[in-house]
Image: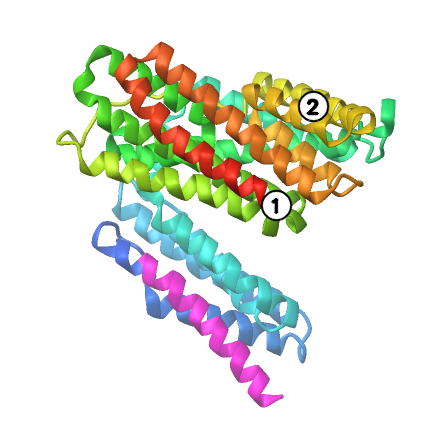
Amino acid sequence: MIEELILKISIALAIGALIGTERERKQSQHAEFAGIRTFTLISLYGIISAYLSQLYSNFLILAFMGLIIIVGLSYYRSSTREEDIGITTEVVALVTFILGALCLSDQGLQIAPIIAIIITALLASKSYLHHFIRKISEKELLNTLKFLIIAFVILPLLPDQNMGPLGVFNPYQIWLIVVFISAISYSGYVAIKLIGPERGLGLTGIIGGLVSSTAVTTSMAARVKETELLIRIAVFATVIASSMMFFRILLEVMVINSSLIPLLLVPMLSMGISGVLLAYIAWRTTSEKKMDTDFKLQNPFSLKPALIFGLLFIAILFLSTIANNFFGSAGIYVTSLISGVADVDAITISMALLARDGVSPDVAVTAITLAAISNTFVKFLIALFFGTRKFGKYIGFIFAVMIALGIISVLFI
């Protein structure tokens, strides 16, 4: 019992020290009322108060009110000396007390360190967050708010049951998939907003590939048409972004139906890793390492692309089910090749779901690979017809190697 209590107190002290370390780093820039020692003591104060509340009722509430008074007086004193003073540290001090108190219970002991890490990360990333906020347009903010309402308010209200022809239409499941795919794209979109294309074409290509590798390919093709001096670095960005698609597919399948991962690893990694290696060779052989980029990426949290993806997903899921019922695996393969031209996410999710409902895992993995190959070929056509012939030739050679490896891996499934 004593050993367990000592462990909980130690974790509470560590939480206070973690948050206090970050706050003390900012004291050279701002007049903060607390550093590592104070925050450690506040967290200790929290767990001691929680312990004593078991012996004396309402002690925790009184202790917290006492801390509020101390923090309030400190803020008042600081505000009289500073014209522009924030209240972040004072609020975090109160939260640290609560985290310390949480450490006394077994369930709270699991949650408190996670919350402490999140808080510290938010505090440490202040400049990045402010930079990001300044770069958000009003339209992007409104689109995001609209989508969040639909995702977290309307989604729980949708019926979670199969309905419609062939029983493939599940409103809750379908919209949940839309939210999931949009969240992946949005994370990349936010990252690009944070780092800015000027921070590095390689990193921008990687993150841009999570949002839309087709958009990156189109952008690079346009830049090459302006000047062929940038052709190799454009090849690098295009191939890197396209390679990210295969890793994105693995992530989607891992979440939807992880049983397919052992079979899917070989084709996806063979195409993805070969693309990264060939892109690196293109990077090493170019003298020009920089390019001013301006990717025209649409906000994936706006309603229009989300609704379009939802309708496309329903159509592909329905067609794949019909193809499987009437034409077997051959019908699914044809559907995958056609679907991959427009969107690889929809057919990937459809196959992952159908593999849980009776479609052979081998057929599902082959269909996903064929869709990825089809989508890669489309990006080659974009490079060829929207860029220059030389750019298309480079992209065609690299994509041919990637596609060949994908086909070979499928033959051994």
Please name which of the two marks, 1 or 2, marks the residue nearer to the observer.
1
- Residue 270 in the image: state x and y as whole percent: 45, 44
Q: Give the residue number, with chain letter if any, for mark 2.
A: 316
Q: Residue at the location (85% across, 32% down)? A: 162
Q: Does the magenta stretch include residue 22?
A: yes
- Which secondary structure, mark 2? helix
- Quadrant location of the C terminus? top right
Q: Residue at the location (74% across, 37% down)? A: 354
Q: Does the magenta stretch include residue 347?
A: no
Looking at the rendered structure, the kind of residue marked 1 is: Ile
Query: Horizontally, is 146 left or right of 329 in the view?
Result: left
Q: Give the residue number, with chain letter if any, for mark 1.
A: 413
Q: Which of 109 and 163 is in front in this view?
A: 163
Looking at the rendered structure, the kind of residue marked 2 is: Ile
Q: Is residue 297 among what the camera can see?
A: no
Magenta highlight range: 1-23
Q: Nearer the viewer, residue 401 or 285?
A: 401
* Residue at the bottom extreme, as displayed: 2
Q: Residue at the location (73% across, 32% down)? A: 329
